[in-house]
């Protein structure tokens, strides 16, 4: 029954023109960045940068494999998983990834990504300008399912491609700045011919990261919501003894003054990480006032030597 309810909800989104707010808009990858919130796009430094800030792949020093597992909002049969791999070759950081969000036996969104990031300019004072690009190929598909009174329903599948681009300025001070523009091609997913479907809008994000000491980093960002105005977000990470980290994030700080009576305006995230000799385990939880909490665990492994040499 729960699968049927989810299927009917998804079906209503795709058959009503202009009503669908779906198709990869809420896709996330990497428990570290999720724990820090959207303010972390200036702090990302691993292979998950293919999703958050492709320019950061320029800093990828070792081959890296990532496995990401999430349980969105605790909803039965709803899962979100990702697998990514990256390495450094020819002075460029590369990454490939596969991401899936699915309702078992009803609906699935698969996204295949290829990304690259490279340092374009190194200034005499030691600061650097990085740039990156991610190509995304998304496929949204329904499994045929039965609706009481209507019989079998099959909406089929729709596949589209798009690009993300980004830039990062790594200063000689303890500050970095990043910019990312997502879904430049604004792909349209139309399951019912003539309905107009739903266009995935282009979105912008700018962020800064400040490291006031070796162990502590604060991130601030402005991100453009897929279906609304921009939000201001913050994230904080504190590392202990180079083996353990705690993280916390706040989303939509611009509405904090409204949240005393409407706590759904503010979202919280948090988590921790444990790492040693190229092995990383990160966990995160993100709250949503109406839908509940989402839990995520990420395993990362860095084989080989820095720079991808063996």
Image (cartoon, helix red, strand yellow):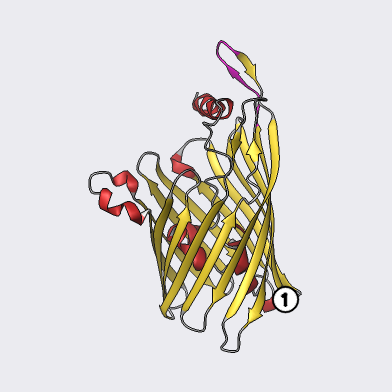
Looking at the image, can residue 52 be seen?
no
Magenta stretch: includes residue 130: no
Q: Number of callouts in the render?
A: 1
Say which quarter of the image contains residue 196. top right
x then y, percent, for residue 92: 71, 72
In-image side of 213 versus 153 (left or right): left
Q: Tell me the quarter of the image containing the C terminus.
A: bottom right
Q: Residue furthest bottom?
A: 124
Magenta residues (range): 142-150
> Toward the viewer: 253 or 301?
253
Please tell me which residue is depicted at 47% across the width and 49% down the height of the picture.
Answer: 225
x then y, percent, for residue 163: 66, 53
x then y, percent, for residue 149: 56, 10
Give the residue number, with chain letter if any, for mark 1.
91
Please tell me which residue is depicted at 70% across the width and 42% down the height of the picture.
Answer: 160
Location of residue 232 with respect to 121 vertically, above or below: above
Please tell me which residue is depicted at 58% across the width and 40% down the height of the picture.
Answer: 23
Q: Residues within 10 Å of mark 1 (few under 14, many from 20)?
A: some
Q: Residue furthest top?
A: 149
x then y, percent, for residue 269: 39, 55
Looking at the image, can residue 126 be seen?
yes
> Toward the viewer: 208 or 235?
208
Disc 1 is placed on an element classified as loop
Q: Residue furthest left?
A: 261
> Toward the viewer: 179 or 82?
179
Please tell me which residue is depicted at 63% across the width and 60% down the height of the picture.
Answer: 165
Location of residue 61 with respect to 86 vertically, above or below: below
> Toward the viewer: 80 or 179?
179
């Amino acid at each position: 029954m729960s699968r049927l309810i989810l299927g009917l909800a998804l079906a209503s989104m795709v058959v009503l023109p202009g009503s669908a707010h779906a198709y990869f808009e809420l896709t996330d990858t990497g428990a570290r960045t999720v724990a820090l919130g959207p303010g972390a796009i200036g702090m990302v430094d691993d292979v998950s940068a293919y999703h958050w800030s492709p320019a950061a792949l320029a800093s990828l020093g070792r081959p890296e494999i990532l496995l990401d597992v999430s349980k969105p909002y605790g909803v039965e049969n709803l899962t979100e998983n990702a697998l990514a791999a990256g390495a450094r070759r020819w002075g460029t950081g590369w990454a490939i990834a596969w991401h899936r969000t699915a309702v078992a036996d009803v609906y699935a969104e698969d996204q295949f990504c290829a990304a690259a990031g490279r340092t374009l300019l190194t200034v005499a004072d030691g600061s650097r300008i990085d740039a990156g690009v991610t190509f995304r190929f998304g496929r949204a598909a329904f499994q045929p399912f039965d609706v009481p009174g209507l019989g079998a329903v099959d909406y089929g599948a729709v596949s589209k491609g798009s690009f993300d681009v980004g830039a990062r300025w790594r200063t000689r001070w303890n500050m970095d700045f990043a910019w990312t523009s997502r879904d430049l091609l604004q792909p349209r997913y139309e399951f019912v011919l003539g309905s107009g479907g739903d266009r995935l809008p282009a979105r912008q994000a700018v962020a800064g990261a400040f490291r006031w000491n070796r162990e502590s980093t604060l991130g601030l960002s402005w991100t453009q919501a897929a279906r609304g105005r921009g939000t201001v977000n913050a994230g904080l990470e504190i590392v202990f003894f180079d083996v353990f980290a705690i993280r916390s994030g706040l989303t939509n700080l611009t509405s904090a003054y409204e949240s005393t009576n409407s706590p759904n305006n503010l979202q919280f995230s948090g988590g921790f990480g444990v790492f040693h000799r190229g092995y990383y385990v990160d966990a995160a939880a993100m709250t949503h006032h109406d839908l509940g909490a989402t839990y995520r665990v990420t395993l990362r492994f860095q084989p080989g030597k820095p720079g991808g040499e063996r």
